[in-house]
Image: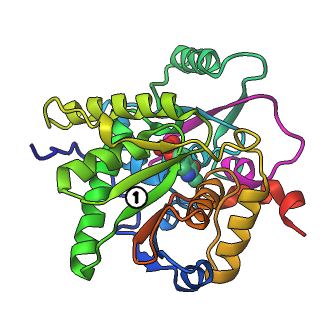
Amino acid sequence: MNPRYPDRVRIAHLPTPIEPLTRLTKYLGGPQLFMKRDDQTGLAGGGNKTRKLEFLIADALAQGCDHVITTGAPQSNHCRQTAAAAAHFGLGCSLVLRGREPAAVTGNILLDRLLGAHLYWCGDQTCSAATADVAAELKAMGRKPYIIPLGGSNVVGATSYVLAMEELMTQLAAEQLNIDFIVFASSSGGTQAGLVLGARAYGFRGQLLGISVDHDAQSLQTQVAALATATATHLGMGTLSVADQVAVNDDYLGGGYAVLGETEIEAIRLMAQFEGILLDPVYTGRAMGGLIDLIRWGAFSRGHKVLFWHTGGMPALFAYADKLAN
Ligand SMILES: *Cc1c(COP(=O)(O)O)cnc(C)c1O
């Protein structure tokens, strides 16, 4: 059954372009590489969370909420885009960030502040406990908070990537382009759940591969499959399981979440210097590093067409200046 989409607000610049990565393809000796530019969604630096926020903010407004609360790592791109979306609609915004406040105000943290968000540092508390505290305080002050989960990865947020798959299929048809593989960074799972469901709904024939940024393959696969099934129900598509289409590679976890290693540094430099495109240190640097490694291992043939879905994150580069500068 076709998805029935709930209302959304319009904040993303869509459709995002698809571009061939000609020089990088030549350097690597194939496969033919393309990029879907969701780093160019337009909202205060852009990224994949902008699409999710179109549905999440619409839901918050429909419920009459006047404040959004979300959570993430200190350099969370999701938190920065949430702060921007909240500002755009005149909503208050509280960001509950993991750990303690770093000494340097840089990257996404700087942007969060410029965008007028209230920042809370979890310290030794779990972020879910801190989020509940912030929500209770706001309610006591007579506000109506709307809580967005980590990465915006619930059925409301994942819906946007079902729709993004329709957008991609329309572009591929218009350009008569057949993509064999779609590769992207996967973390809280909303992007992958939406894409997998969209692939099913719109008849995408190729394969999708999520490069895990922080979870072992088994747990991310389980999480994505469950979210995809719940999202199908949310969109009136009936009960369907896409578990066998959720492919996750966890070979590139390196030193752990947000730890920049040689794989990420090389991918960031290659993309910058062959294509003039900036990846990010945490997600797309890792996923592209994984894709390059898979290419070198011969996972694809020369004629395959591989689309890398750029999910954004560029502002976080500045928080890693010491490791990237030389
Ligand atoms: C959040 C994020 C991802 C991961 O998306 P999920 O939907 O959480 O899996 C990938 N890349 C960037 C830049 C992100 O900010």
Residue 41 belongs to magenta span: no
| Secondary structure of residue under mark 1 | loop
Image location (x, y in percent) of residue 2: 11, 47
Query: Does the image show residue 249?
Result: yes
Residue beneath the point at 42% across and 40% down: 190
Amino acid under disc 1? Ile
Residue beneath the point at 33% across and 37% down: 156
Image location (x, y in percent) of residue 220: 49, 33
- Identify residue for label 1: 11
Residue beneath the point at 76% across and 62% down: 265
Toward which corner of the image does residue 202 lie, by quadrant? bottom left
Q: Seen in the image, is 46 located left or right of residue 272?
A: left
Count of marks, rendered view: 1
Query: Does the image show residue 88?
Result: no
- Which residues are drawn in magenta? 89-112
Residue 101 belongs to magenta span: yes
Q: Residues within 10 Å of mark 1 (few under 14, many from 20)?
A: some
Toward which corner of the image does residue 127 lie, by quadrant? top right
Q: In terms of depth relative to the viewer, which is nearer, 237 or 269?
A: 269
Q: Seen in the image, is 213 located left or right of residue 311?
A: right
